[in-house]
Image (spheres, helix red, strand yellow):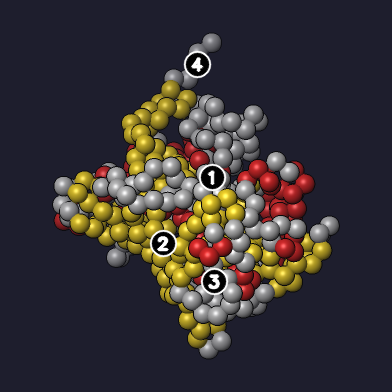
Amino acid sequence: MAFAPQIRIPGTYMRGGTSKGVFFRLQDLPAAAQQPGAARDKLLLRVIGSPDPYGKQIDGMGGATSSTSKTVIVSRSSRADHDVDYLFGQVAIDQPFVDWSGNCGNLSAAVGPFAIANGLLDAQRVPMDGICTVRIWQANIGKTIVAQVPMASGQVQETGDFELDGVTFPAAEVRLEFVDPAEEGEGAAMFPTGHLVDTLDVPDIGSLPATLINAGIPTVFVNAADIGYTGTELQEAINGDAQALARFEAIRAAGALRMGLIRSVDEAAQRQHTPKVAFVAPPAEYTASSGKPVQAGEIDLLVRALSMGKLHHAMMGTAAVAIGTAAAIPGTLVNQAAGGGTRQAVRFGHPSGTLRVGAEAIEEQGQWRVSKALMSRSARVLMEGMVYVPADSF
């Protein structure tokens, strides 16, 4: 019996923020995978090692968590005023699908460094030292991200003293600006229901106040106290509780339906990446997963968020955009948890520590608009070379 050989595909394994993923240049993918469709999805599933009924992704590059089961495709952009196009694929761990419905804010920090190092920017755009500004078109959601990437002696600077809770070692700071991060277009709105707070009816749970927002990534915010939590929980308090995870999925599905992202609750299972579900609470003292104490006076509020059905170990970058935006708008649950009033930045507590995110929101003719959201992350190449997959896997 003849067996298919393995093929080699150039790729880079990178950390961006508190996530890791396999990065590809579009031009390096096999021809069949250079277009969206089944071949591309099957290829990326095999690269990551999914679907894996054991939930470990042993036979692939994935790390068996939502933060490490990710892929990125980058290419030169044909759009005016943009350098590269960035496409993100969230790979399911135990199911055979890739979710293309949203962005990864953490890996957004690695796109600029990857593009520079892989020759996707014109040489005259890249300074020897200082800051290289990379304008990124986020193709999943049709938005612009501006990355400020530090350079040293003509190379991307990756080491430094910038510390990010949820990442063990310091690195160089990459500043990100998410331009007009709210949903746009006909019928679209930052608050798809037209309300800052809705009453969300969730089967077998009841009615909950909820803020449903499209900014950074569609997100469903609820109060921690309304679902029996304090907002200081760490992963083990929730991820080992099957009933709790089922309740969060029911809240997420109800929110997705109310936001018009799905037509029936059954569709939520095939749209795991969006929306996110998060719960908020006023500031309180707690101990982060690293053992670091977080004082109530250090933060404006507490936030815990779930990604791909599990409580995230830190905070998704796109959810941080949603948090910063909602915090800037008086009346949302996020703003209320932070003490109300107007603000242009917020520092919140998450399971791994704290994070600061800024947002500029303005009200025009009764409608809220956010011009940009700002945060800092870091990124680093972990490995580069060739990814191997069986030739008959896609």
Crowding at mark 1 (Cα within 10 Å: few <14, some 14-19, many 20+): few
Percent across and percent down for residue 315 are 53, 54
Amino acid carrying label 4: it is: Phe
On screen, residue 189 above or below 50: below
Q: CA distance from mark 2 to mark 1?
A: 24 Å
Residue, disc 1: 291
Residue at disc 2, secondary structure: strand
Disc sitting over residue 327 in the figure: 3
Residue at disc 4, secondary structure: loop
Mark toward the viewer: 3 or 4: 3
Quadrant of the image for the N terminus? top right
Amino acid carrying label 3: it is: Ala
Amino acid carrying label 2: it is: Met
Residue at 37% over, 36% down: 382
Residue, disc 2: 375
Q: Which comes sooner in the sequence, label 2 or label 4?
A: 4
Mark toward the viewer: 2 or 1: 1
Q: Which comes sooner in the sequence, label 3 or label 1?
A: 1
On screen, residue 342 above or below 69: below
* Residue 147 appears left or right of 191: left
Percent across and percent down for residue 60 are 50, 30
Name the residue nearer the viewer: 290 or 75: 290
Asked whether residue 388 appears in the rendered view, the answer is yes
Quadrant of the rendered structure where residue 32 is? top left
Q: CA distance from mark 2 to mark 4?
A: 49 Å
Residue, disc 4: 3
Name the residue nearer the viewer: 105 or 136: 105
Q: Residue furthest top?
A: 1
Q: CA distance from mark 3 to mark 4?
A: 56 Å
Mark toward the viewer: 1 or 4: 1
